[in-house]
Image: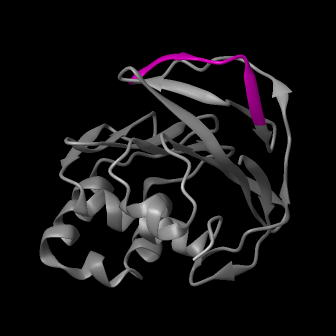
Amino acid sequence: MRTVAITGSEEVKGKAMMGTALKMGARGFALGMLLLVGGMAHAGQAGGVNMPDSLQVEGRTLALTHMELKKKLFFNIYVWSLYMEEEPTCFKEAVSSNSLKRLHFRFLRTITKDQLVGSFREGLRQNPAMRQDALNQSLEKLLSSLHDVRKGDDLVLTYLPGSGLHVSGGASGGVHIPGKPFADALFSSWLDTHPIFPK
């Protein structure tokens, strides 16, 4: 089930707390991006950002599961979207499933690399798994790929089964982190602080 939410400035564990979930549907457009082959006509919308209801990635279909606008004070910061190949029934299934999944961030204002890196580091380091040497090295690899962000830039984190995490979009120079453990830790950290699935 697709949901759309607006998040205010209150923080929980250094991350935004979910706002009221709303269902919204609108006619939109297909977005061209790395790994994207095509998209459907219907779209979700949050914060003035339109995202397609589904994507074709490497011949597989991803469905838009959730969209959320992150706000701080009176400022819109970004919209994040979650795409899943299989609709999970719970948090554990969303994280552990060896299926294609994607977190897509669309930035709505200019953010420096230091701000972006600091935000990611603060959020992801709360996951004890990220303190393991191997995963910490992967985290640093992801963070080192990040750039200063301009309004309208994207950051796309795609887990490809049998391959690993692919990082793309204008907010990153692009990097591939092989294997499943780091992707699992990243999605677990994000979905733990954005509880859109029952635990």
In the drawing, does residue 165 fall left or right of residue 178? Answer: right
Please indicate whether residue 114 sits to the left or right of residue 108 in the image. left
Asked if residue 111 lies left or right of residue 37, the reply is right
Residue 80 horizontal/vertical position (percent):
62, 49
Q: Residue at x 34, y 62 (%)?
A: 184
- Which of the pair 130/4 is nearer the observer? 4
Residue displayed at 25% across by 41% down: 175
Look at 64% across and 83% down and name the residue there. Answer: 12
Residue 36, percent from left and from top? 45, 21
Residue 105 vertical placement versus 193 (above, below): above
Vertical placement of residue 54 versus 151, above or below: above
- Quarter-of-image position of residue 161: top left
For the image, the number of numbered tags is: 0
In this rendering, the answer to whether 65 lies above or below 8 is above
Q: Main secondary structure of the magenta part?
A: strand
Percent of width and height locating residue 96 = 36, 62
**Residue 141 in view of the camera:** yes
Q: Which residues are magenta?
A: 35-44
Look at 44% across and 34% down and name the residue there: 169
Q: 175 or 18, which is in the foreground?
A: 18
x, y percent for residue 49: 74, 36
User: Residue most toward the left?
Assistant: 134
Q: Is residue 74 magenta?
A: no
Residue 141 shown left or right of residue 15 in the figure: left
**The C terminus: image quadrant:** bottom right
